[in-house]
Image (cartoon, rainbow, N blue to C red):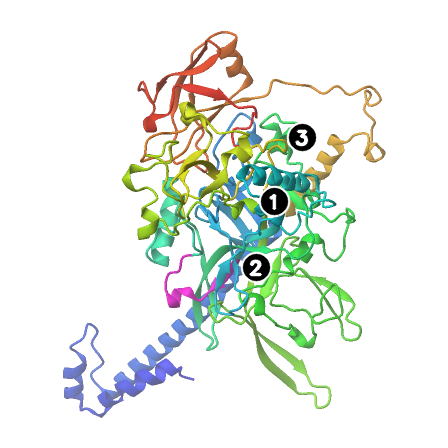
Amino acid sequence: MASSTGFLLLAMASPLLLLNTTNAEEVVSSGSEEFPPDQDALWAWLQDKVQRLEILEAMNDKLGKHILQQQLNIEEKTRSGGDSGIKAERTEMDGLKSYYAGTLSIGHIHNHPDFPRTLGLGELHPVLNGVDFRTRHNDYSLVMPSTTSSAYHATQDVPFPEIPPQVSSKESVDEQIAEMREWFKAWRDSDHSVRDYRPYFKPILCYLEGAWTTEPQSGFTEPFFSTRHQLDASSWDDLHQKARFESGSGIKYDSENMAFLPNKFFNGTDGKLFLAQWNYRILCHPIKATLGTQHLKAHEDLGARLSRRKTIEAFQATRGVRYSISADDEEDFYESGSLLDRLMREIPGKDNYNANLTDDFNGLTKFDSYSDHPLNAGYYHQWYKEGEKDHNQIVRRGFHDRNLFVAETTQEEIAALRVEMCETKAWNGKVVCAMTEKRVSYAIPLEIVFLTPLHAWNPYNIVYKGDASSEAGQTVVADQRSGKLTPDEALNGTNSVRYFHTPAHFFSGGDISTDVVNDTDGVMGVLDGDGKMRQVMASGVHVFLPDIVDVGSLRTRYPVMPLYDEGSMAWKEMQAVRDVLMDLEGYQQYLQYIPSAFNASFVRLVTTAPKTLVMSSATSEDAGYHHHKMSLSPRQYLALVDHKETLTIHSLLDSEHTHYHELEIRYFKDEFKILSCDGDFRCQHDHGKVLRESDDADPMV
């Protein structure tokens, strides 16, 4: 039978059949292909074209199905190779051992505490449910899904913790500082017996969410707002072309504003294929359940630790360590959910916190795995229960993905998955079919962040002037004010990119001399509401807070991002071998042969740790406050100090800097001094000539 296209062609051509042979020849011979001159030949010619169109339509239909299957094949191959998680990061260093290659911080986490709501996070290459993609430089904000609106991607700011009344009620700033330190001691020690710190030190779970969207039809959309980075593309086609160029050429866009976000075909309601676009965003959720630092266990990522020659204890004081979330009473084995699973269940999908969706796919209602209530599928979850009678069968989302969290949504901006389900009616034997569709998004955890009272604490009553680009915000740096410790050069209040409210005295124990302004590690001069210059430090989020007097340096950001490779068979075997090697005594019952020296005393091989040198802070106004760090190997350190050699080294190009310096340095008169910088006598941005040796060997702390 002729196709609809064939009938259309015949209908359009039928007037030609009514023409006489001569007229028909005149009409149809004007094109690039001459029609036959008589009616019978013309009819045969048309039938041939119809058959060809039918063949093309059939081939096009098969090609579309093949493309869908190829997409599935690629995703299934990715799914079978690992779990949802981080697959790769941009490599920043290398060495003779493969585990030397990588980055100095997991996820490229870094500080932007001079922004009130910005958390430094570099480029990532994640996998979510088999979807391979690469992000731009993220530097995400402290925002959460809306609690009042169900609109697509409606968000609101994560609230900062309040200040303990025992602090704010003190009359003098010195008294407030002393009392605030006691609250940080209580949090450090997890001791709420005297000062119940829990309402004022609030954990939030920040997560990466991805979904297939219908955005190719609605236009280009930025994944999420960042105060520092946006995609460098004008359309999805532009982004795809630039991603192909970047990957093919191996170049790096200096702005780090490029991403690889794939697209793929979906089945539409009319049976036709449409193109869906993958997109992602990063959000945070204020945790309702009880969660303290005691629930965060450091992973033994041996390669990352050995590349820095760190003991287990020392490695935990770096940005390279990764954590897992574990309840106090949680065993090594669990069947249907962990503390992380319970935390993720607090987070909604694209319908936001008002989501209330049930899942009755295939006629079976899904129930919450922790209760007998129907599952709210609009929130992220791994496990559910189902069953025709007592719904006691516990099921996990996905085939084997340990990190797959799924939430359903009603948002039409999310591409729908469709399938036709048929059943045979028992009473009449008829087969009844119906189309079922679901719209879903996926998520993985990224980090636990503890918000502290420092974000809202402003004992000097410094005026916050909002957006830096506003008229009021621009007065902060008017008249060439750069934050130096003089009344004429101190910032005139603060704004959205210069958020300095915390007294420097809280950390250091005393004011900083203006004679050493270049070595103050972030101390800024800011005018308070009365025009008096105050020495303050950044009040945004730090990975590690600066040393607090009588308290120490406390960590506030705990990366909990899973790794894609952890789901592979090779990784599981390697992890088992690592556990045995790291604790031979504890695992001796599983060894095939007991080492001959097993009962002897084990001697820890102590090596000289790498050293870190820090440049003094930049003083030029165009560069803003920053300093550079560089790592010395034990051999380099001894060459400088013991053998008085001159060495050429490079500062680290980490996630906080877009430039580095080549330094020629020498050690004399008990100081590391810069002889030349990038071939000149002084460094760009007016860094000083003396390098300070850091107490910590890790260059990212």
Label 2 element class: strand
Category of crowding for the residue at label 3, using alpha-carbon neighbours closer than 10 angstroms: few (below 14), some (14–19), many (at least 20): few
Say which label, 3 or 1, has the lower sequence index: 3
Q: Amino acid at mark 2?
A: Tyr
Q: CA distance from mark 3 to mark 2?
A: 34 Å
Residue 373 image offset from top left, x and y in percent:
73, 71
Q: Is residue 630 visible?
A: yes
Which residue is painted at 67% across and 36% down in the image? 300
Q: Which residue has dot 2 on it?
A: 442
Residue 511 image offset from top left, x and y in percent:
49, 29
Name above or below for residue 682 compared with residue 55. Answer: above
Contact, mark 3 vs mark 2 (Cβ under 8 Å): no
Determine which quarter of the picture holds residue 534.
top left
Q: CA distance from mark 2 to mark 1?
A: 18 Å
Residue range highlighted in magenta: 210-222
Instruction: Please check the rendered image and state whether residue 216 is part of the magenta-colored stretch, yes or no.
Output: yes
**As rendered, which of 172 and 4 lies closer to the eye?**
172
Q: Amino acid at mark 3?
A: Glu
**As rendered, which of 436 and 440 lies closer to the eye?**
440
- Judge depth for marks 3 and 2 and give the one in front: 3
Category of crowding for the residue at label 1, using alpha-carbon neighbours closer than 10 angstroms: few (below 14), some (14–19), many (at least 20): some
Q: Which residue has dot 3 on it?
A: 313
Q: Which residue has dot 1 on it?
A: 565
Determine which quarter of the picture holds residue 367.
bottom right
133 relative to 50 in the view: left or right: right
Q: CA distance from mark 3 to mark 1?
A: 25 Å
Quadrant location, the C terminus:
top right
Q: Amino acid at mark 1?
A: Asp
